[in-house]
Every structure is written in structure tokens, then in C-alpha cells.
Image (cartoon, rainbow, N blue to C red):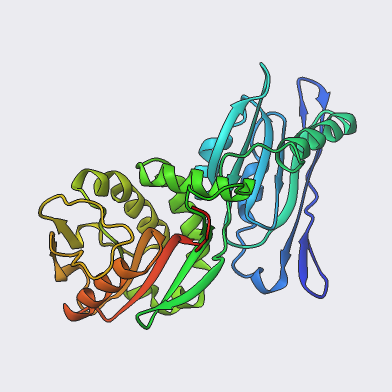
Amino acid sequence: MSEKTTDKAFFRPKIPIFTANDSPMIENLAISVPFSEVEEARVGNYFRLSDMPGEFLIVQKPDNTFYFLCAKDCDIVNICHSFDWYIVSKDAFNDRLTIGIGLADKESIEGELYRVPDEATLSLWRDILRFTFESDFVRRFFLYNTHFKGKLRIDGALCFYIHDYYPTRCKDMPVADRKTSNLVFRFKDGQQAALVAKIFSLCISRMPFFREKAANAVLIPIPAATRERHAARFARFCSLLARRLKIADGFRATWISEDREQMKGTHGQDKLSNLIFHPVYFKDRDVFLVDDIVSTGENFTQMKRELIRLGAKSVTGLFLGKTVKTENK
């Protein structure tokens, strides 16, 4: 059933007591959803999770993260995959239990789902998840921000970025900014494509520009300096993100005819001279032009102008991070 307050709907279905091997278990499902998001919220996912065998505790936060502690016979990986929840990490907690963290849907759902032997176990498991993922002791290697932090215009085009990015030369960098750097470096090296695609999909899918342009959109990456780096960084990422957003994958819209030296931070040089464009992928389409970091915006500007010249209808910039100018050397 559901209850309404001024700004949230609460779902507290009555779940029957489960008995396994004559051992009584306690179980419950309680979630709250911002009233504005009720129609889009996929509350059925929680009922599917409640059908898992074994013992489990799943806690979802409004920032789209969810934590879990469950018996190893719980098929949480495949169930989450079936409705496109992304498990960021999963590790053995002990011989019997698995602990992990993931990213759910774009709706700001908060809730808890559990099946455990007794209240004492429930309290202990809550403390374990709270200590592991929410206390000052947390040692997450990455940040999992699922909203765009800021926007700007580059050469007249609207652009969005998820993180502030501080160059590695910066001293005394806060822990959160180091975690941003960790994610950027891994992504540049062709790692964490699935995680970054999930993060981008959550950020993009809740934005008004996406709802306006999705039906005609194509995702195109700003090419890296070499074919090898470009393929490693963007091929799988573009495929996964385009599939999640249900838009066209434009990874092949450009071809690197020859490798070149990196031109990071340079001005006034032609950064497209080694590229061949294939307008069939983007002519009369709304382009989502994506890259890891935006600094001066020159790469984006040159790409945007060429895409428009060759027939793109519009270009919107999407970046994992925006370089913060600093005086540190």
C-alpha cells in the first residue's frame, strides 16, 4: 500500500513471514519516493528483490546508491542486472555473507528491504552497512555523484559536468577531489567504462535537455590522441551509455586517420587535422558530445563547429569533470 505526505509517497506492503528449514524469519519492505517522481519510480524492482532466497538487507539512499549485505545464495547480481541497477563492488564479508554497493535508478528513492532471522541480526547488519559505507572510516576509491554539478556555455553551446577536477600538480587536495582524480584516471586508461556509463546515464536522464532531444540524439565522443586510446576509452563506454539512454551510438562518427601527440592545454592549433568525419551518423541530429575533462574548451569548440558545419542540428557538451584553475604549481 502507499501513503501520501506533502512531498513523498511511502510504500509499505505487508510481506508474509518467511519460514525456511522451520526457522522463522522477519522481513519487510519500506520505501519513500518524492511525490513528483512516483509515476516514474520502478517500485516493482523491490518486489522482485524480495523474492530472492536466503537472508539479506538492502538499503537505498536518495543519492541513488544502495548497499547490501546478503547470504551467498542470494542472486542479487543477476536480479539487479535485469533492471539495470549497477553493482559497483561486491566482496566476501565472511564465509557466509557478501557485502557491496551499487547504483540504482534516477528516482530519489529511500528505503530498506530485509529478511533476517531476528531483530538483533537486523540491528547488527544495519550497523555493518552504516560503518562500511557512511562513517568517517569510509574508504571508497571513487565518488558516485549522480547529478551534474554545474553547467557552462562554450562557444554558445550548453555544457554540463559532473565533478570539479583538480590537476595532479595541486597540493593538499581534499579526499573527495582525489577520488574524482581516481575515477578520471581509470576512465582515461579504458577502465571503469560500465561505472562511468551508469553515472552519466543517471545524470543525463533526469535533465530537461535529454527529454527534449532524446528521440533525435546521438552520442559522440571527442577523440583521444591515438586510435588505441580512443578505442580503449570510448568504444565500450559509448555502447553502454547509448544503450542505457536508448539513443544512437556515434562512436564511429569520427575516424582517427593517424595518431598524433597530445595537445592538452594548447591554443590555436588544428586538433581535427587527423580526423575523418562520417556525417551519416549525425546529420540533422542532436549531438551529445562527451569527453572526460573540459579545460580550455578548445577541443570541444573545434569539434562542435565541425559537426554543425557538416549538418548536426545541435551540440550539447557532457563531461566527467571540469578543470578548476589553481595557482598551485
Q: Position of residue 112 (x, y in %)?
A: 75, 47
Residue 71 picture location, percent across and down:
67, 26
The N terminus lies in which quarter of the figure?
bottom right
Residue name at image x 71 percent, y 64 percent: 33
Q: Residue furthest top?
A: 95
Q: Residue at x 41, y 62 (%)?
A: 245
The answer to whether 163 is drawn above or below residue 232 in the figure is below
Residue 73 or residue 130, whichever sits in front: 130
Residue depicted at 23% across the width and 71% down the height = 268
For the question of whether residue 54 can be seen, the reply is: yes
Would you identify the image quadrant in which residue 299 lies?
A: bottom left
Task: Determine if residue 82 is in view.
Answer: no
261 or 115: which is nearer to us? 261
In this rendering, position of residue 179 left or right of residue 27: left
Residue lying farthest right? 120
Q: How many marks?
A: 0
Quadrant in which residue 243 is drawn? bottom left
In the picture, measured across the screen, residue 116 lies left or right of residue 218, that is right
Query: Whole-percent x and y of residue 284?
Result: 23, 80
Asked if residue 60 lies left or right of residue 4, the reply is left
Residue 116 image offset from top left, x and y in percent: 79, 31
User: Residue 178, relative to residue 93: is it above or below?
Assistant: below
Q: Is 304 in front, or is 49? A: 304
Hey, which quadrant is residue 101 in on the image?
Answer: top right
At x 40% / y 63%, what residue is drawn?
294
